[in-house]
Image (tube, grey):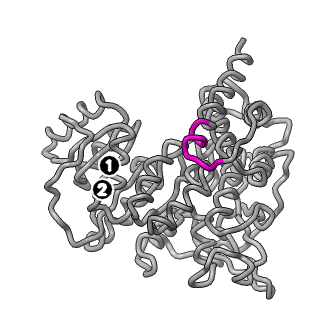
Amino acid sequence: MPTDQPISSIPPVESQNITILGATGSVGLNTLDVISRHPERYRVFALSGMTQLELLTKLCVVHRPFYAVVAHAKEARAMQNWLLEAGSDTLVLYGERGLETVAAHPQVDTVVSAIVGAAGLKPTLAAVNAGKKILLANKEALVMSGALFMEAVSRCGAILLPIDSEHNAIFQCLPVGYGGVLADAGIRRIVLTASGGPLREMPLCALYDVTPDQACAHPNWPMGRKISVDSASMMNKGLELIEACWLFGATPDQVEVVIHPQSVIHSLVDYVDGSMLAQLGNPDMRTPISHALAWPERIDSGVTPLNLCAVARLDFEPPDDTRFPCLALARQVAKTGGTAPAMLNAANEVAVAAFLAQRIRFTQIPDVINTVLDDKPVEAANDLEVVLMADTSARLLAEQWLARRAN
């Protein structure tokens, strides 16, 4: 029977124990690919997946984790039976408590936080509070609770390494021992690159009729549908801007966004002496994942070496706020602070889900967000409960906007 309590007799292993939160997404699958290349270094401790149960079951049969985590008890019972029939001794947990169990378990060394959306906040904080090494792909944890999150990292002695390609690139371009203040390191600004997504060159008048499949057809990166829509609207880059401020001690004005269609330069750091350092590579998530897994060492990721002659050219252009109003909203929210980022993220999650369900137009996504930000006052985000209440209230306001439109 599934349980939400930890088992007590897990045999010790010499390799590093890895929990992957969000194992069935692109980051999770790429992490498993890297891990499988280095079985002497890494052991899969736990995998979670909330919707793709068949895929999660297959992953458990292959990688034999001690735990798997799904959303609900009924699903946990079904999956436990499947695994028993397959000869697997993986124990299936469920729900938020199950996620927190595998994130904070004393035998876990590293937690890969790759759950999409606000659902990743609590289990990632559980890993932080347990002092784990955290490979962060979940933007929303820092977007929603940046000050609280970073304070917990410092207080609990956790190690926080970004595996978003942009933030990992910045991390690689910073000086060794960077102390969290740009000016002290002689840094003028951080430059986040963005592909511009699949709608970058579409006529503005045509955006009204964009379909979910068009918005999800990313030219460079294979991603889930929610993140793909965020890339098309450039909300993804807006969330990354907010996240970069917390990760690297920057103000919003010190973070510039530049469209780079080739996705070869993953981000840059501009120094006051005129030097600009960039991290380049093929668009493959295994590069930042392997870098963070092995840091401060480097290991083979399986990524094809970059052929500069084949790339031939690198293009750059500024983002257009008329085409990408979500990016402008995120920048303003970064300056506002408090609970505004949590509200922005919540409203965007509701709006994107509505767009994917064909309840609203692509061009209405920023309308939903604007309405929520206008209707709910911003509070100081000095307590996790305040942040979570802001998230809940923003979702309710967004759903109310959708209901009014439907009527």
Circle 2 sits in a helix, a strand or a loop, which is it? loop
| Relative to 395, 201 lies left or right | right
Residue 92 inside the magenta-drawn segment: no
Total number of numbered discs in the rendering: 2
Q: Is residue 46 above or below residue 392?
A: below
**Range shown magenta:** 381-389
- Nearest the viewer among 253 and 310 is 253
Main SS of the magenta segment?
helix
Q: Which residue is mark 2?
A: 105
Q: Which residue is mark 1?
A: 101
Q: Find out whether the residues at labels 1 and 2 contact each other: C-beta distance under 8 Å.
A: yes
Q: Residue at x 70, y 15 (%)?
A: 406
- Nearest the viewer among 313 and 392 is 392
- Nearest the viewer among 23 and 154 is 154
Marks 1/2: CA distance? 6 Å
| Relative to 22, 262 lies left or right | right
Residue 385 inside the magenta-drawn segment: yes
Quarter residue 349 falls in: top right
Kind of residue at disc 1:
Thr
Residue 301 position in % (x across, y down):
43, 71
